[in-house]
Image (cartoon, helix red, strand yellow):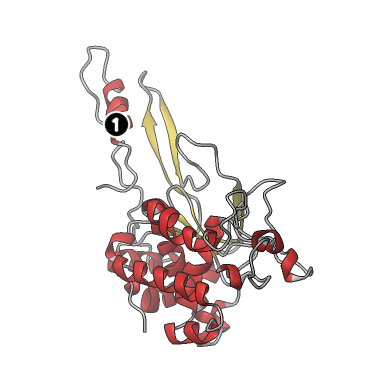
Amino acid sequence: MKRYVMTLLALSLLAACGDEEGNPGVSDLDRDWYVIEDNPGDPVDHERFLIYDQYGVSVYYNDTVGSMIRQDRWGNDYRHYEVLQVFYAPGSPKPEGGFTLLDDKDVLLPALAYAREEVFGRVPAAMRSVPVLFVGDMACAEYAEPDFYRGFCALLVKAIPGFGELPDAGRRELDVRLLGGLFYGELVSAESGWLNTEFYAVSRALNPDPYTDVYSTTGTWGGQSVSNACYGTDLELSLNALGFLRPLEESDLPEEEWYTPTPMLDVMSYAELLFRHTPAEVEQMYASYPVVLQKYRMMRAKAEACGFAFD
């Protein structure tokens, strides 16, 4: 299936682009905008081409991925710009969020070379059709300081400053953002049923009160404190006891007053955990929190079913 081609729309526009006698005109509406052409004179663009040529992954540093001259139905030329619609949801309210582009794309070169040599080969073939847009910073309603975000037609990844000077352990943070981000995107786009009935249900089952949701929601009054989520139970007043890894927002308040994550942040947190630590490290880190380990093992099994491998 071609990437993100809206076939019905393309056909209707094609039908409208005929001449006065009704003969269909020549259409370029099926152009694949995600093909990366080589530019040997630019090291960053050349590295992007090598990634695309080897793995089929389209990598960008600008959300405007191309432009071309088209004609409207009356024969007038106009320039069309193809833009990655990240914060967009057809038929639904527009997701809240935004991003800033990199000031200097050249800072990406060592990260792209590392990703080509160490990361993209670990991406399952079915996930390589998702374009990746490296940005300087980003924000979204459901996550506290996100490092990645899977939008409508691309994965946003926050670039890591000074990547070329980092030790190997620091560079592996890019593994987390790319692999974790792509896996997270697969879950929220194709596994919503499993998330609702299996994954989220583990934490929700810890408080059987039908009027208490252990998760926070977005919005002014959407925060659910740890103490409220644990109310009426004998649970330790902590995120880990509820099966959570990250609060909705970092805070200097006692942990019992922290807000629990939204469901999406919960998924993101476990996607990060999968690729930040080995299974043995995770089992040791959370040995005192069986609910965390239960959700981690569920998530790891799902990732393995998608084609990821773990040490």
x, y percentage for residue 267?
49, 62
Q: Residues within 10 Å of mark 1 (few under 14, many from 20)?
A: few
| Residue situated in front as seen by the camera: 282 or 55 | 282
From this view, report whether residue 145 is shown above or below residue 281: above
From this view, report whether residue 180 is shown above or below residue 90: below
- Read off the residue under disc 1: 8
Q: Residue furthest top?
A: 21
From this view, report whether residue 176 is shown above or below residue 79: below
| Residue situated in front as seen by the camera: 240 or 265 | 240
Q: Quadrant of residue 37?
A: bottom left
Residue 88 located left or right of residue 125? right
Residue at 55% x, 63% y: name it.
206
Quadrant of the image containing the C terminus: bottom left
x, y percentage for residue 123?
34, 69
Residue 128 located left or right of residue 165? left
Residue at 37% x, 67% y: name it.
40
**Is residue 175 at least partly visible in the picture?**
no
From this view, report whether residue 295 is shown above or below residue 217: below
x, y percentage for residue 304?
32, 71
Kind of residue at badge 1: Leu
**Is residue 264 at least partly visible in the picture?**
yes
Residue 34 located left or right of residue 293? left
